[in-house]
Amino acid sequence: MNSVVLTAYNGMPYIKEQLESILCQLSPEDELIVSDNGSDDGTLEYVRLIAKSDKRIRVVYFTESRGVIPNISQALGYARGDLIFLSDQDDVWSDRKIRYCRGRFSKEPSLLLLQNNAEIIDANGKPIGQDFFSLRGCRKGVIKNFIRNSWQGCNMVFRREILALVLPISERVPMHDVWIGILAEKAGQVDFDSTILACYRRHADNQSAMHRSSIRKIIQWRFRLAQALIMKRKDIRRFRKEITSLDSLH
């Protein structure tokens, strides 16, 4: 079973196209969890409307904005699938994304987390001639990604076992993607796959995600991330032992 977790906040009008690109490749047994973070632009009402006629969609929400970390934590807590896909509200998925990713995990039983590449498009859906991997220098490495993160949540897919390690997501960390990515790599096998399986939309409301932060803010974030990771050391060791025990049974 596949669980797609989409966090939403004032996602109109782009969320319509993204939902279509996801739903067209879900089976009747799969689920799409949409967690709304207090939208006031009609996003929640739109998702509720289409959910009435599609039982694969599960809608959860906050009545007022609580921030990215509480929203993604809430959504992940509802996921029931053996594979969990993270999604932004304004991107567009390739129609082979789920099939391709399931194939990778089926062939590689030890793989815990996979990140695919994305073509960058403008607000109107036109390619701008860049892809996320080239722009951010995406590659494995705990130290590398601690210093300059190249994990991107909206292109992640991972086994549900990871939830026991990453939840609850510490509100001390800057973003959920670096938290999930680093913990997964410290716990087991991860991979950056350069195959483009989505279009990452850049527009006025998300431009800050692609811009560099101040040195002071980066240092503050890294310090808080380091503290949160240190507190997870015992959990990582325990998780490794559990995964090793499961692998020995296969």
Image (cartoon, grey):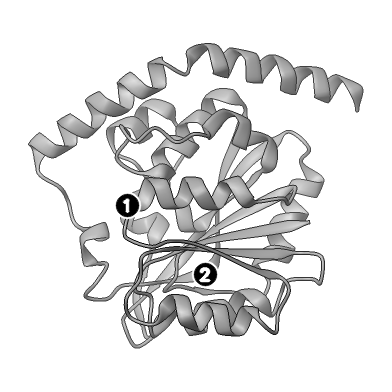
Q: Position of residue 204 (x, y in %)?
A: 21, 75
Seen in the picture, residue 9 relative to 138 is either above or below; the reply is: below
- Tell me, yes or no, if residue 152 can be seen here: no
**Could you say where residue 81 lies in the image, as x and y percent from the top left?**
73, 51
**For residue 151, above or below residue 126:** above
Identify the element where label 1 is drawn: loop
Q: As displayed, is residue 35 above or below residue 161?
A: below
Which percent across, then down, holds residue 39?
35, 71
- Give the SS element for disc 2: strand
- Name the image quarter holding residue 175: top left
Q: Quadrant of residue 119?
A: bottom left
Identify the residue under disc 1: 67
Q: Residue furthest right?
A: 250
Residue that label 2 marks = 198
In this picture, residue 197 sits left or right of residue 83? left
- Residue 175 relative to residue 84: left or right: left
Q: Nearer the viewer, residue 190 or 10?
A: 10
* Contact check, label 1 and label 2, Cβ < 8 Å: no
Using the image as rendered, state which of residue 35 and residue 191 is in the foreground.
35
- Kindly tell me whether residue 75 is visible in this rendering: yes
Q: Residue at x 71, y 74 (%)?
A: 25
Q: Residues within 10 Å of mark 2 (few under 14, many from 20)?
A: many
Residue sitting at 49 percent across and 59 percent down? 117
Q: Please state which amino acid type lies under the numbered disc 2.
A: Ala
116 vs 120, left or right, is right
Give the spatial CA distance, label 1 vs label 2. Answer: 25 Å
The quadrant of the image that shows the N terminus is: bottom right
